[in-house]
Image: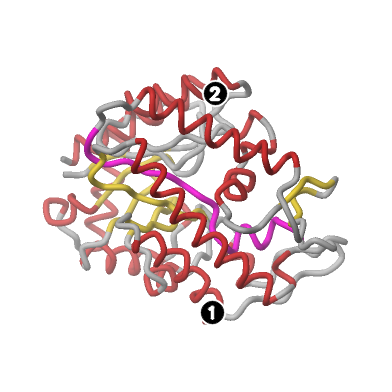
Amino acid sequence: MTIATGIGSMPGTEQHDYAEAVRTVLGELPDLPHLPEVPGRGVTATMTGRALAVLADLGADLQPAGWRLTGGGAGADHRRARSLLAQDLDVLEEQAQGRAGAFKIQVAGPWTLAATVEKPRGDKLLSDRGARADLAQALAEGLRGHVRDVRRRLPDVTRLVVQVDEPALAAVLGGAVPTSSGFHRHRSVDLPEASAALEEVLAAVAAEGAEPWVHSCAPGTPLGLLRGAGARGLAVDLAVQTAADHDALAEALEAGETVALGVVPSLDAGSPTSDVQLTESVLRWLDMLGLDPAEVGGHLVLSPACGLAGASYAWARQSLVLARTTARNLG
């Protein structure tokens, strides 16, 4: 049976918006709800802030240029990020009591963090091979504890998915990440190192009995590398996939792995979007790949194309409804 999920982020600017986001996700995505992110609440609630809250053994603080590792203990904003994640999990635990089945959490991956967080003395972690390795190790260890915490709070969940978000991976591999000055670009990371860091993080997820996915809305993300590193689910925006990407997604489905296909616009395009139109587009895609919907449906997940933080609240809710009804049309 094809099911639906969300990518992660939801609109909102206040803490009470978070409780509403949890209610919406639990209500509209019964088969695979997720832990919402509401980055509009501030820098500690962004993708980077939440991932730093998960890190083990590394401290960070906020500088005018953004997040920076301290080389010591956590700064005040890092402590706030950890506190906010704990509060959000409290809200989830309260609202999801007794919920069984599947659930998904998200975290920024090692390469997206390396491209956005600075070393203690400045410049991105991406500029230092040793720092990159330390970051991947800290993220892997932190995720182990995070997964255990979520399992403790949701004891009836039988399938826990951990989605590792890597929107910056293609830029990292292509040497397109700017240095702090903005005048140069960081050297590209070679494929074996990129794969090894991802493998360390994804293996930690799998070792805790959770299901590792990797998500990227960015074009040019090497899907084969993600599968080789241990991803058992690929979450993508269908609109930016190339012919080679379609082949990789087909191979994943045929291998019994999960493909989360982003088919619902993340922003209200202004023109009507119906579940009938979306169903037809998914069926055309499957037909193009020569895949039988009945045979791959159990491994196909539908979602919005990317996060919903920039959407209106009405459209965010409607996009989840469209993903769910389209999945059931294929069901």
Residues under numbered marks 1 and 2 in contact, where contact means CB atoms less than 8 Å apart: no
Residue 274, given in percent of the width and then of the height, sits at 33, 29
Q: Which class describes the residues within 10 Å of circle 1: few (<14), some (14-19), or many (20+)?
A: few
Residue 73, given in percent of the width and then of the height, sits at 72, 52
Which quarter of the rendered picture does the N terminus lie within?
top left
36 sits to left or right of 43 = left
Q: Residue at x 40, y 51 (%)?
A: 162
Q: Residue at x 34, y 50 (%)?
A: 161
Give the answer, above or below, for where 128 lies relative to 98.
below
Give the answer, above or below, for where 108 lies relative to 133.
above
**Tag of residue 191:** 1
Looking at the picture, which amino acid does disc 2 mark? Answer: Ser
Which is more toward the observer, 296 or 117? 117
Which is more toward the observer, 49 or 222? 49
Which quarter of the rendered picture does the C terminus lie within?
top left
**Tag of residue 312:** 2
Looking at the picture, which amino acid does disc 1 mark? Answer: Leu
Residue 80, given in percent of the width and then of the height, sits at 67, 36
Q: Secondary structure at mark 2?
A: loop
Q: Read off the magenta span.
A: 100-118
321 sits to left or right of 287 = right
Q: Is residue 112 magenta?
A: yes
165 sits to left or right of 253 = right
Give the answer, above or below, for where 78 lies relative to 134.
above
Mark count: 2
Q: Residue at x 39, y 48 (%)?
A: 148
Give the answer, above or below, for where 118 lies relative to 78.
below
Which is more toward the observer, 322 or 194? 194
Lower position in the chain sequence, tag 1 or tag 2? 1
Q: Secondary structure at mark 1?
A: helix
Distance between mark 1 and mark 2 Cα atoms: 38 Å
Q: Residue at x 61, y 65 (%)?
A: 135
